[in-house]
Amino acid sequence: MELVNSIASWVLKKRMHQIELFRKYPHEVQIEWFNKLINTAKNTEFGKKYDFHSIKSREDFQTRVPISDYESLKPYIERVRQGEQNIIWPTDINWFAKSSGTTSDKSKFIPVSKESLEYCHYKGGKDLLSIYFNAFPESKLFVGKGMVLGGSSEVNEYKKNSYYGDLSTIIIKNLPYWAEYVRTPSIDITLLPEWETKIEKMAQAGAKEDVTNISGVPSWNLALLQRILEITGKQNMLEVWPNFEMYAHGGVSFTPYRDKFKKLFPSDDICYLETYNASEGFIGLQDQFSGEEADLLLMLDYGIHYEFLPLSELGSDHPRAKLLEEVELNQEYAIVMSTNAGLWRYMLGDTVRFTSIDPFRIKISGRTKYFINAFGEELMAENAEKGLQIACEKTGASVKEYTAGPYFNKEGNGGGHEWIIEFEERPNDIEYFTEALDNALKSLNSDYEAKRYKDMNMHLPKLTSVKSGTFYDWLKSKGKLGGQNKVPRLSNHRKLIEEIHELVEVNM
């Protein structure tokens, strides 16, 4: 395995030259990909409808093709799922990444073409390793094995040879044969549909292997690692995996989980590498390792053309999205993307801020639908995560899961925010924790501070502490265990808050 590690390291580091190219020439790379996408899809049904043949510039494209969401593209996607081809993309599409919001039973089926799989998702995985080996040339990552906590695979009911599942499932199912030699456990275990059985079997298998790296959503990986410790009787994971060196995480903010992982892996040599791989495309990678909070390098040569919609344009009849060269630092934008899987001017639903424009680096700030703005406070997920972190530091608490939404006074005007929190370490004084959270949010968000002034518009937050496992039970009740499923952190309504209260009452 030493030879394999040396060869893999040499091959992967060669990719750094191409990464440097789009760092230095971002606009040229984006224009090149735009032209490729338009030219490739000009004879599809979608391309003919919007006359891609006559599009001469990105400004033409913006004027002619409307910004879309899943619902507006769904009629095209459903036809592809039923077996029609050359609708949104010229090559056959047989895989669909199932992506669903946990607040409803509706699912999105995102098309995954051969091109997006090979030149976007797999390329992102390779670049993750390229950046890692370039930063840590003495790495022995391939001396041991990698463990991926993926989703389950299901057959699409519409036609033979058309499949859907979590994005991780699609990636695992299409990996080359040699990848089996550097990963664990077997693919049959990795893709088990029943989540609790999968965790148990993965834990049993992983406890016997020399694992050097893991990847996946932090919350689900915590459950897996804690089960491995129960099986082995060890005090921490380095006693089980002494050669462990890297965890590639994504899907949710790592901030609430960092201290938990540091307890599991008590070493300053462990690398925590953030990725931004959505079902729609691989978007960003951490490429700096000097501090705990790293921004993500926007990956510009993955077959995606980017636009960025200012939040002030959301809901506008004729929203004006900005091209990459037009973005400004520290402004909130919704990502709009056109991809090599046939998504055209598709609004992803995530919001980002640019922290650098040379090269282009971003920080994920929230979701276009996950925020609270019931009183004009415009609270985003990034504010919530940081506010909780500050409150925890002040009180010695530790948060496992949480959600928040508005409450409204029955009499008179105003209301406030209601937080439901599942603590790992409960604060001694809940009222003090609530005040610390409130003060932190005031310091982080001027709109929140203004609305809280003298309790005139918003009142002090309400906080409910629930027992361990409450959010797990809620996800289970929705059939949303595992994979990319996660608890919505913020909602501009009370549906989720009330469902949690009902669940708590039933279990009392």
Image: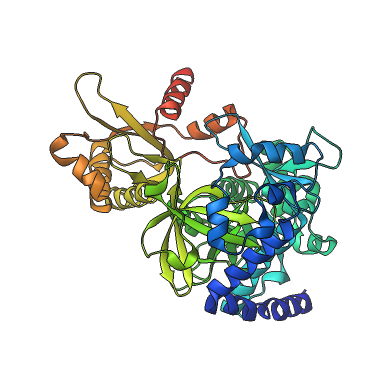
Horizontal and vertical percent for residue 446? 23, 50
Residue at the left extreme of this rendering = 454
Q: Between residues 91 and 436, which one lies in front from this camera angle? A: 91
Q: Is residue 78 left or right of residue 62?
A: right
Measured from the top left, where is residue 241 in percent x and y?
Answer: 64, 62
* Left or right for 497, reference 269: left
Quarter that holds the C terminus: top left
> What residue is drawn where x is 68% and y is 68%?
126
- The way the protein has been coloured in the rendering is rainbow
Answer with the quarter of the image where residue 352 lies. bottom left
Horizontal and vertical percent position of residue 71: 59, 37
| Residue sitting farthest toward the front | 54
In-front residue for pair 283/473: 283
Where residue 56 sits, quadrant-wise, is bottom right
Look at the image and tell me whether residue 420 can be seen.
no
If the image is split into quadrants, where does the N terminus sit? bottom right
256 or 161, which lies in front? Answer: 161
> Which residue lies at the image location 64% right of the left edge and 73% below the top edge?
130
Is 478 left or right of 397, judged from the image as shown?
right
**Residue in the picture at 78% in, 53% down:** 90
Q: Is residue 88 visible?
A: yes
Q: How many marks?
A: 0
Q: Residue at x 63, y 41 (%)?
A: 73
